[in-house]
Image (cartoon, helix red, strand yellow):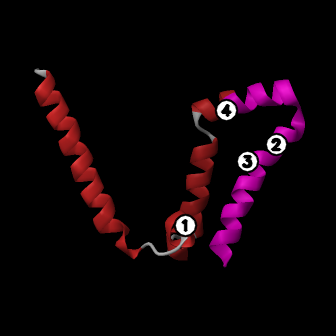
Amino acid sequence: MSTALKIGVIIGYIAIISFIATYLGKGTKTFKDFAIGGSKIPWYIMGGTLFSTFCGGATMVAYVGNFYSQGLIWIWIPVSSSSHVQYLYMQ
């Protein structure tokens, strides 16, 4: 495949993704709309998303390393993150 074709595919992909994001993002007015879908997403979907995020392979390796190097204080980072999302969801 030639270099010009590769660059054309990349530019086309970026253009299509930008168009889709602009078209679908018109209804997003606030951070709450962006972060939690304007409270239209059910709690079990939000919980499953948070659980899946915190159970990823790289996350587990990073948390174990940080627990080892800095101590138990690192337990509060995932707790704090999930409580902030819960706060946004309940308002």
Q: Judging from the image, what secondary structure is the residue with disc 3 in?
A: helix
Relative to 81, 28 lies left or right: left
How far, Cα to Cα, is label 4 from label 2?
12 Å
Quadrant of res 80: bottom right
Give the residue at x 52% y 73%. Answer: 30
The chief SS type of the magenta part is: helix
Indicate which label's residue lies in the foreground, 1 or 4. 1
How far, Cα to Cα, is label 3 from label 1?
17 Å
Q: Which mark is residue 75?
A: 2
Relative to 64, 25 lies left or right: left
At label 1, which amino acid type do we have?
A: Ile
How far, Cα to Cα, is label 4 from label 3?
11 Å
Say whether disc 1 or disc 2 marks the residue closer to the N-terminus.
1
How far, Cα to Cα, is label 1 from label 2?
23 Å
Give the residue at x 83% y 25%. Answer: 68
Q: Residue 62, percent across and down?
A: 69, 30
Q: Are marks 1 and 2 in contact (CB under 8 Å)?
A: no
Q: Judging from the image, what secondary structure is the residue with disc 4 in?
A: helix
- Is 91 placed above or below 48 here? below
Q: Mark 3: give few (<14), some (14-19) or many (20+) Cα within 10 Å.
A: some
At label 2, which amino acid type do we have?
A: Ile
Q: Are marks 4 and 3 in contact (CB under 8 Å)?
A: no
To which residue does mark 3 refer? 78
Q: Which residues are magenta?
A: 62-91
Say whether disc 4 or disc 2 marks the residue closer to the N-terminus.
4
To which residue does mark 1 refer? 36
Q: Are marks 3 and 2 in contact (CB under 8 Å)?
A: yes
Q: Which mark is residue 26?
A: none
Say whether disc 4 or disc 3 marks the residue closer to the N-terminus.
4
Instruction: Please identify the quadrant where the N terminus is shown.
Output: top left
Q: Are marks 4 and 2 in contact (CB under 8 Å)?
A: no
